[in-house]
């Protein structure tokens, strides 16, 4: 199995230079407000319900601060209410409609026209032909294109298709925000990439739209603001990320305080069977060969570094209000078990299915209902044959530990981790940074943030400022040569 949580904490802590102590792990212990143990109870925000019976120094589960509606009396009531109508129709806005998440969401709408219809679509503008095709087929009332330079080409693509009633068209980042809060959409699917999803998601919540959350970076960067907003505006945020959908499904109906541990499964990404010594020379093309999933380039690269799993640890923390010590990562090469929960009595529930994003997207859109789509292929366990598991290799995947460290530090640090990762991945995909330079850039950016203007309880403006600062700093760090002295930096700090 995985490293014990306390080992992760110690190793995660050792990745960052402690400010006031050189003891391993002291960085995290010294991170005020992250997790202070007082008389056996943690004082981190939220009411902690349970102490696990495991003999680890600290193992706590908080079930009432998460964004997803599970595990509290209030959310079980929400579930009962949502189940009342037997027939439903949901009006859907899709941010990132031309991407992997967007096109698969539209597949679902196409399959269930009685259940779902499209209100608005947004895209960056790199594929206006596809956006025009989608406009023709789904007749959105409004379309947003972030890249204003692509507007005219899109209009021309609409003319060529003879779209009878062209939609209202908006452009730029403000246009994407307008799209997110537009009209009478019931739910907004966040399928755009990166922290660019933050402001549109905040706008959608304030317009009282439910959120089907695929864009995990929004929660990583914006969790301290987004989670309270979800509660303030009384909307439902349902996870679409396959792992969190699995957890969400397993937790339906679980009583308050029942959850003991989360087991996040990871495919291991493109390099899961490569020796760590070969990673210094891998190319973007190598990293983009995901073994199981067909996804956009950014998340595929994150899978190869296992930063995707690190981001998902933070995402699980914000969605389910669970402490970092109770979230473990396990490599599961088949990607059939999409994640599992352990309850207090050690019973484990997992959710299984083929690696097909349409299933978690369907559940995020139809929760708490269960819809049947005939084209969905039922799982065949005999065909699967065997399910295997192994512990993640920390030398190969330093990003994972950086994410644990950022999550435990809390406040603005996850936003900094996320922004530095976005910059480093973009540079790597452009062949301007080596693969193992990705964790090096992120670690250095986090170190500089820790000693400059880390904030424990950030506002939205603080998070946006931290994101912008981290992008500038990560570019500066990436420009230094040598960026990564053959692994010496991380190696030295781990010993
Ligand atoms: N793909 C998957 O299976 C999964 C993805 N996710 C998450 O979902 C999100 C989307 O991933 P994925 O679909 O793979 O990404 P893709 O790169 O395939 O698609 C991204 C989409 O977002 C649009 N877009 C990008 N930037 C902006 C912007 N600033 N404003 C408006 N639209 C924008 C793109 O438009 P254009 O085409 O014009 O460039 C495209 O439609 C990510 O956060 C990812 O981590 C989570 C789980 C699984
Ligand atoms: C499809 C999905 O939800 C992704 O998060 C996927 O699980 C990534 O694969 P890895 O397990 O390789 O990160």
Image (cartoon, helix red, strand yellow):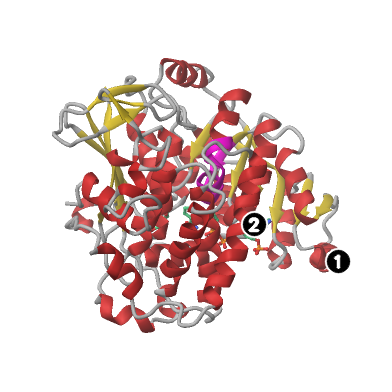
For residue 76, what is the image quadrant? Answer: top left
Which residue is pictured at 78% across the width and 49% down the height?
A: 174
Q: Position of residue 351 (x, y in %)?
A: 30, 41
- Indicate which quadrant contains ligand 1: bottom right
> Is 342 on the left-hand or right-hand side of 148?
left
Q: Residue at x 56, y 29 (%)?
A: 228
The residue to which callout 2 is attached is 468
Give the residues drawn in magenta, as a range: 211-225
Q: Is residue 155 above or below residue 18?
A: below
Task: Say which residue label 1 marks.
Answer: 152
Residue that appears at 39% across and 74% down:
436
Q: Secondary structure at mark 2?
A: helix
Residue 92 in view, yes or no: no
- Residue 482 percent coordinates (x, y): 45, 82
Residue at the left extreme? Answer: 55
Residue at the image point whose x is 26% and y is 22% from the top: 39
């Amino acid at each position: 199995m995985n490293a014990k949580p306390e080992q992760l904490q110690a190793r995660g802590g050792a990745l960052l230079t402690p400010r006031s102590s050189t003891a391993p792990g002291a960085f995290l212990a010294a991170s005020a407000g992250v997790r202070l143990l007082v008389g056996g109870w943690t004082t981190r925000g939220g009411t902690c319900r349970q102490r696990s019976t495991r003999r680890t120094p600290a193992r706590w589960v908080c079930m009432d601060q998460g964004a997803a509606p599970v595990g509290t009396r209030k959310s079980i009531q929400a579930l009962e209410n949502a189940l009342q109508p037997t027939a439903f129709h949901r009006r859907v806005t899709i941010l990132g409609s031309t991407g992997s998440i967007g096109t698969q969401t539209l597949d679902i709408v196409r399959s269930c026209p009685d259940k779902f219809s499209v209100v608005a679509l947004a895209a960056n503008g790199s594929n206006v032909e596809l956006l025009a095709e989608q406009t023709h087929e789904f007749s959105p009332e409004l379309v947003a294109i972030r890249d204003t330079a692509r507007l005219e080409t899109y209009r021309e693509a609409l003319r060529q298709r003879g779209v009878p009633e062209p939609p209202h068209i908006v452009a730029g980042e403000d246009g994407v925000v307008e799209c997110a809060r537009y009209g009478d959409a019931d739910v907004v699917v966040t399928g755009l990439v990166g922290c660019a999803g933050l402001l549109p998601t905040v706008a959608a919540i304030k317009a009282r739209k439910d959120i089907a959350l695929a864009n995990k970076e929004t929660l990583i960067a914006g969790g301290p603001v987004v989670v309270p907003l979800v509660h303030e505006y009384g909307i439902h945020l349902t996870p679409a990320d396959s792992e969190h959908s699995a957890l969400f499904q397993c937790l339906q109906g679980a009583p308050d305080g029942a959850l003991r541990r989360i087991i996040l499964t990871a495919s291991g990404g493109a390099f899961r069977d490569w020796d760590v010594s070969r990673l210094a020379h891998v190319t973007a093309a190598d990293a983009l060969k995901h073994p199981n999933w067909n996804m956009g380039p950014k998340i595929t690269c994150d899978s190869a570094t296992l930063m995707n799993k690190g981001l998902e640890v933070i995402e699980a923390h914000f969605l389910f209000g669970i402490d970092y010590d109770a979230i473990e990562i396990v490599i599961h090469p088949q990607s059939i078990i999409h994640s599992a929960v352990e309850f207090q009595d050690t019973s484990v529930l997992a959710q299984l299915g083929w690696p097909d994003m349409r299933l978690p997207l369907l559940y995020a859109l139809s929760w708490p209902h269960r819809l049947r789509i005939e084209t969905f292929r039922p799982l065949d366990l005999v065909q699967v044959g065997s399910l295997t598991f192994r512990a993640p290799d920390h030398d190969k995947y330093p990003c994972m530990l950086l994410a644990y460290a950022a999550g435990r530090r809390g406040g603005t640090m996850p936003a900094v981790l996320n922004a530095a990762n976005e910059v480093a991945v973009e540079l790597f995909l452009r062949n301007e940074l080596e693969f193992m330079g990705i964790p090096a850039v992120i670690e250095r950016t986090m170190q500089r943030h820790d000693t400059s203007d880390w904030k424990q309880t950030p506002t939205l403006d603080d998070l946006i400022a931290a994101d912008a600062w981290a992008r500038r700093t990560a570019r500066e760090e990436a420009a230094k040569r040598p960026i990564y002295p053959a692994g010496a930096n991380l190696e030295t700090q781990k010993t």
